[in-house]
Image (spheres, grey):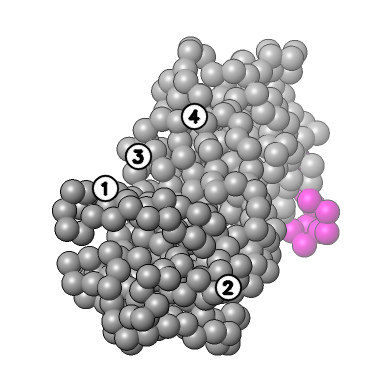
Amino acid sequence: MSTPRRRTVISCTLMLLPLTASLTACGGDSHPLAGKPYDAAKQITLGGAAKGVRAGEKADPSKPLLVRATDDGSRITDVTAVDAQGRYVRGRLSDDGTRWRSTVPLAAQAAYTVHVATEDTAGSPGRRSLEFRTGQYKGKGKRLKVEFGPGNGKYGVGQPITAKLSAKVENPEERAAIERGLKVDSEPRVSGAWYWVSDEELHWRPKDYWPAKAKVRATSSLKGIKIRDGLYGSASKPVKLNIGERIVAITDASSHSMTVYKNGKVINEIPVTTGKPGFETRNGKKVILEQQQYVRMTGASIGVAGTSEDYNMDVYWATRVTWSGEYVHSAPWSVGSQGSANVSHGCTGMSPGNAQWFYDTVRQGDIVEVVGSYGETMEPFGNGFGDWNMSWKDWRKGSELTKNVRGKNEVQTGPARLRPSA
């Protein structure tokens, strides 16, 4: 038979660091089932550095936030700390409920509200709220700036979001802190993750293509956050994307045809020509990078200047899919081969009328996928956006927050700001 918990007049002390504020006396003999928790704040006594804070001084953001309960049998059951921007402070509660400590840095020059829930030896619940402000970080340091891409506007369902950093970040813990401060919200909600392309650049993409007509917003809450000694987060401009209809063009190099889908339905089938032997078009999914009505194309761009393969021509209705020069474009010189043979230097060529229709139908961020080619697969990074050629499993390994997370706990976007677990 279990022994009932001893009822007594309790005296719990909570300490909040860097304020080092001591709270004493949470007296009461109310029944554990009483509807109203006792107010621990009524018997607060402050000491040490907390006297200065009450007088208007600010807490040191370089120190962790610490909440303690005394050893009289009372325990902490929950701690919630949030700043004025809605950023929650992640922390860890000890198994015995006597200590809670923040696990992420506090922001400089920020206002915080801390809510602490306690329980006495009789099981009666208590509550206490506390507010404080942090000052500047001590010492000089650089500001970490984040530049989001591709810029405000309307894009296709395959458009990744980019985040370029003003400083290199290699440490896993520092990378995790940055990821927690970079938010992607969308309506409707989707599962997605950041991927560290390099020490200075991240890409964010959903598990699958964006839903048609989705609204996407990327923001940073890193302002004032300490990344490491000498490096602190700076304010960053958000980016807003309006996603259009789902346009996907699939080019089959073996059958010399392109099928264009809109929201899953075929809207056009176009005869094409792709790369000939030695210049095979890359297989894989490519995100449209830009569109130009006129481009001057030369053999120098692919390293064949001065050879029998050299060329210098005006090209119209050009839709670019790689930075190395692969386009979908008008090719009136190869109309006789379109639909029957591959004769290009790697681009996808079609008649002027079809090229103009394609140019007018697609936009930046739409998907062009090539299958059936003898060429290599489009690389994920470095030559445009080949992000979709990486499996979702491998993509999640590129994030410090999702590489060890099971699928059911995938990161989701959404307008609601979720409270992280302690």
> Which numbered disc covers residue 121?
none
Judging by the rendered image, the residue that carries numbered circle 1 is: 300
Q: Note whether 149 is above or below 185 in the view shown.
A: above
Q: Which residues are magenta?
A: 26-37
Q: Note whether 243 is above or below 118 in the view shown.
A: below
- Residue 391's quadrant in the figure? bottom left
Q: How far, Cα to Cα, is label 1 from label 4?
A: 39 Å
Q: How far, Cα to Cα, is label 2 from label 4?
A: 44 Å
How crowded pointer 4 is (Cα within 10 Å; few <14, some 14-19, many 20+) is rated as many
Magenta segment includes 34: yes
Amino acid on which disc 2 is placed: Trp
In this rendering, would 290 be left or right of 153? Answer: left
Amino acid on which disc 4 is placed: Leu
For the point 39% across and 77% down, which residue is it?
335
Judging by the rendered image, the residue that carries numbered circle 3 is: 199
Dot 2 or dot 4, earlier in sequence: 4
Judging by the rendered image, the residue that carries numbered circle 2 is: 357
